[in-house]
Amino acid sequence: MALADSTTIGQLVTVAGAPTNQLYGYGLVVGLAGTGDQTTQVPYTQQTILNMLRNMGISMTNVTTMQPYDVASVMVTAEVPAFAHAGQHVDVTVSAIGNATSIAGGVLLPTPLRGGNGQVYAQAQGPLLVSGFATSAGGNTTSVNVPTVGNLPGGAILSNTIQANYNINGNSALLLDTPSFETAQRISDVINAAYGGNAASAASPGEVDINANGQNPMRFMANVLSLPITTPQQPPTIIVDAQSGTIVMNAGVSLGPAVVSHGDLTVNIQTQNAVSQPGPFSNGVTVGVQNTVVSAKQGKAQVINLPHAATLQDVAAALNAVGASPSDLIAIIEALKQAGAINGNIKVI
C-alpha cells in the first residue's frame, strides 16, 4: 500500500460542533476619489445615505441633486474561527455591489455583521486595503487586479460569542476533511493504540467518534489532535479549470504510451462596408452594401509519440512536448483518459 508523508490527526479533521462561522453585512464605503456609485443608477446607495443621515438627525427634503460619487455600497463578509470569543478581532472582506469603479482609499463605515440566524455577532469598520487600481482618461481605461474588492485585517470586533458544542459527557466526534474509509479507520486505530481499545471508533468514512474515558476533555482532545499518523496516498487526480486553462495533477498520475496528432484550424471572416451609387439621372437610390469574405486555414498536424511516464516530472515533460495551448491541452488530456493512456481521475471545476 502506498503511503503519504506523516502528518497529525489535527491536520486531517475538524472537531464536530466547532465549525468555522460565516458572517455578512451591508454597509457603505466613503472617502472615494470620485470612483463611487452613481446614485441615480444605484438607488439603494442613495436610500442608505438618506437613512444614515436621518438617524443622525439630518433631514433632506430635496434629494434629486444628490450625486455623492465618493460613496459606494458594499457587502462585508467574514469567517470567524471556532472558539472565538467576544472582543476578539477578525478579518473582513469588502466587495462593491453597485457600479463603483474602485473602492481604493475608502473607509468602511460601522457595519453590523450577522450570522445565518440573523443575529448580530460583530461590527466592522476602518480604512480598506485594496491591491488593485483603475484609472481612465480620454475614453481609455486601465485596471490592475480587482479594485472593487478590499480587505480589512482585524477590522471586525466580535460582540457576541458563537458557542461551540464539541464535548458532551466526554464524547466527541472528529469530522474528516476528506472522507475516506481507509483514513477514518487508520485514525481510529492510532487513537486506540494510544488510549485503549474503546477510545475511538470509525462511525463512517467521514466521522470518527472518540471518548475521553474520564480524562480531562481539553487535554485529551489536544493530545488526540497531535498524534502522528501516516495517511494513504491520495488517488491519482487531475484537476482542470476550464475557464482559466489551469491543470493541476498530484504525484500519482502516470502516462502510458500514446500517439497524439494535434493541429489548428483557423477560420477568418471579414466584412467590408461599401456604398452602391446609382448612375446619373437613373432615379436610383443609394444603398449600403456589405461584402463578406470567408477564408479558412488548416495548420499542419503534429504527430507526437508520448512515451511511458511513471513520475509526475515525466508526465509534465511529455505533455510539454505537445506544445499545445492550455485549452487544447485540456482536450488532449481528456482524450488520453478516454483512450486509457493516462492514469488519474479528471475533475473539472
Image (cartoon, rainbow, N blue to C red):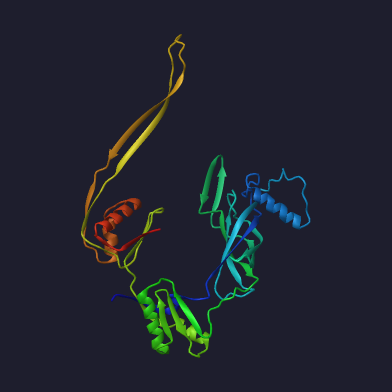
Q: x, y percentage for residue 128? A: 60, 60
Q: x, y percentage for residue 344? A: 30, 63
Vertical comparison of 78 with 261: above or below: below
Query: Is residue 220 in view?
Result: yes
Residue drawn 23% across the image and 48% down it: 302
Residue drawn 28% across the image and 58% down it: 337
Q: x, y percentage for residue 220? A: 49, 86
Q: Quadrant of residue 230?
A: bottom left
Total labels: the figure holds 0
Vertical comparison of 26 with 158: above or below: above
Q: Quadrant of residue 103?
A: bottom right
Query: Is residue 70 in view?
Result: no
Residue drawn 43% across the image and 14% down it: 278
254 with respect to 214 (left or right): left
Quadrant (top left/top right/bottom left/bottom right) for the C terminus: bottom left
Which of 305 and 343 lies nearest the eye of the viewer? 343
Which of 81 and 273 lies nearest the eye of the viewer? 81
- Residue sitting at the far front: 203
